[in-house]
């Protein structure tokens, strides 16, 4: 009889449960959005209880829709939004406060205080990442200073601090497993990349009690068992946990040193596998762990973008220039070719390679020819320009030109954007025939761990290739315009 793997992708906007068969093919999928809680200060939060309830709901719906025999589900994999910080009770698992989302910069002042105190270099050297409110450590510190229930729980040894993977695992296993994998741990800014341990000095700097942090495990470990609150008659093994970008890297088959992919979701991650030798870069990018499996650690160099697909949501919901994301491709193609409008979407600061937390967005270069189509095109183009900024930094760091870029995420359905990315970065952009790469990556890994899949499963994925078709002169002119727009922000900060 057929065997199945469930990949759960708990992302910034939604929770998905996807059923894969024994050949790695998607059988069915279900998705449920959760509320984006944004206050008048621009702080971004998620309701942890809602997220957990949605996980249970989408798995139940998936099984109902698929009409499969539940006993044939052999393993579970979990991918998650990475730096989002959660705090909950060790005793009964209830959340103490809303999760602080990776996009949220409320801990900026705390990071600035640490920077002024001279800890920036130590943080970078130890964790591979610039001191920033983007990562979990400063978010944990903010909770400990500002949420009374969190402070009390810490004093009473009842506090768990972790990323979304740890929260879900704890709840799914009824508190039996409080663990994380190395890919997620490397994004907290508390992991020593050289020693592969929670760093006591960093925990002291961020005032994080080490006993509040989860157990570190290899990415394809047997993390625990769950029946999803009684949905299954038996407990199913959870055999993989990976941060969503690393999960997509694994699913894309980027296992070799030098392979590159970008996941374009709410934000974007541009990531290169740099192999098993740790190298801390100095070009405004981050060094993280791709995964640790079978005793071997693979590292990545990465740049993160705050606003990628979220720019389209801004067009749709905030300024209401479009009624559907599908309109963007048509409008961009209709835009006046010589319009020079640029949007730099620094709505919550600029990420890599600039790392300016207080930056504000800018729309510039408009003329009388600028209308809705031109602004929509500028919004789409901003995604590609930000990715190009990171690719050029990666190329500078490794000393060679990237020629192939694998992409994933819903925005990759936009043919205009994929062609523009190829043009502006002068790379072959490979768009897969599968959208759900974070879920596929963890399902694939879990299937390998469970003995259902092997390392040849990447043949399941087929690609459409976009090749650059503009001149070097035109490419450089466009890039120069983008850099001029970014420089307007840099001068103000």
Image (cartoon, rainbow, N blue to C red):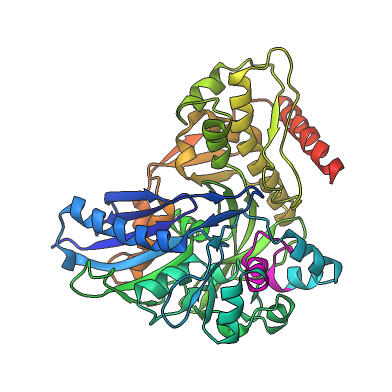
Q: Is residue 137 magenta?
A: yes
Q: How many marks?
A: 0
Q: In the image shown, does 151 or 360 lie closer to the viewer?
A: 151
Question: Residue 408, position in %: x, y?
Answer: 48, 46
Q: Quadrant of the N terminus?
A: bottom left
What is the quadrant of residue 334 in the picture?
top right
Q: In the image shown, does 190 or 460 lie closer to the viewer?
A: 190
Question: Residue 57, position in %: x, y?
Answer: 30, 57
Question: Residue 261, position in %: x, y?
Answer: 54, 50
What is the quadrant of residue 133 in the picture?
bottom right
Q: Is residue 395 magenta?
A: no
* Range of residues picked out in magenta: 126-145
Q: Main secondary structure of the magenta part?
A: helix
Residue 441 visible in the shown view: no
Residue 391 visible in the shown view: yes
- Identify the residue shown where x is 86% and y is 67%: 116
Question: Residue 224, position in %: x, y?
Answer: 36, 78
Above or below: residue 394 compared with residue 218: above
- Identify the residue shown where x is 62% and y is 53%: 43
Q: In the picture provided, is 57 more to the left or to the right than 2?
A: right
Q: Which residue is the extreme one toward the front?
A: 148
Q: In the image shown, does 276 or 76 lie closer to the viewer?
A: 76
Above or below: residue 74 compared with residue 456: below
Q: In the picture provided, is 39 more to the left or to the right than 169?
A: right
């Amino acid at each position: 009889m057929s065997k199945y793997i469930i990949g759960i992708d708990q992302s910034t906007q939604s929770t998905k449960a996807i059923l894969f068969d024994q050949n790695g093919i998607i059988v069915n999928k279900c998705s449920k959005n959760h509320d984006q809680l944004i206050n008048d200060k621009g702080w971004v939060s998620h309701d942890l209880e809602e997220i957990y309830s949605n996980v249970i709901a989408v798995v139940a719906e998936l099984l109902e829709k698929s009409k499969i025999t539940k006993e044939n589900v052999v393993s579970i994999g979990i991918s998650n939004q990475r730096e989002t910080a959660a705090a909950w009770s060790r005793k009964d698992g209830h959340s103490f406060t809303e999760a602080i989302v990776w996009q949220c910069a409320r801990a900026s002042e705390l990071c600035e205080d640490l920077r002024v105190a001279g800890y920036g270099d130590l943080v970078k050297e130890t964790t591979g990442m610039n001191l920033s409110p983007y990562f979990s450590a400063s978010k944990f510190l903010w909770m400990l200073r500002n949420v009374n229930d969190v402070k009390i729980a810490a004093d009473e040894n009842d506090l768990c601090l972790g990323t979304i993977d740890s929260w879900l695992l704890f709840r799914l296993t009824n508190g039996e497993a409080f663990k994380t994998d190395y890919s997620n741990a490397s994004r907290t800014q508390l992991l020593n990349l050289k020693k592969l341990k929670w760093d006591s000095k960093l925990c002291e700097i961020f005032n994080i009690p080490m006993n509040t942090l989860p157990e570190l495990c290899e990415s394809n470990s047997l993390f625990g068992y769950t029946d999803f609150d009684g949905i299954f008659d038996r407990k199913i093994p959870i055999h993989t946990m990976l941060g969503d970008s690393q999960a997509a890297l694994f699913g894309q088959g980027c296992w070799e040193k030098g392979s590159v992919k970008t996941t374009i979701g709410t934000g974007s991650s541009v990531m290169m596998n740099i192999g098993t030798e740790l190298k801390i870069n100095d070009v405004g990018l981050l060094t993280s762990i791709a995964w640790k499996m079978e005793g071997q650690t693979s590292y990545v160099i990465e740049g993160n973008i705050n606003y990628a697909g979220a720019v389209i949501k801004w067009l749709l919901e905030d300024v209401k220039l479009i009624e559907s994301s599908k309109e963007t491709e048509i409008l961009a193609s209709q835009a006046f070719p010589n319009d020079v409008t640029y949007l730099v979407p620094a709505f919550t600061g600029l990420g890599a390679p600039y790392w300016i937390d207080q930056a504000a967005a800018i729309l510039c270069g408009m003329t009388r020819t600028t209308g809705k189509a031109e602004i929509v095109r500028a919004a789409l183009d901003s995604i590609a320009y930000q990715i190009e900024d990171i690719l050029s930094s990666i190329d500078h760091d490794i000393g060679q030109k990237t020629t192939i870029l694998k992409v994933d995420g819903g925005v990759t359905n936009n043919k205009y954007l994929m062609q523009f990315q190829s043009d502006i970065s002068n790379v072959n952009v490979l768009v897969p025939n599968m959208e759900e790469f974070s879920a596929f990556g963890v399902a694939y890994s879990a299937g390998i761990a469970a003995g259902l899949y092997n390392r040849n499963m990447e043949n399941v994925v087929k690609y459409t290739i976009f090749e650059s078709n503009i001149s070097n002169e035109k490419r450089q002119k466009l890039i120069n315009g983008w850099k001029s727009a970014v420089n307007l922000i840099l001068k103000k900060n």
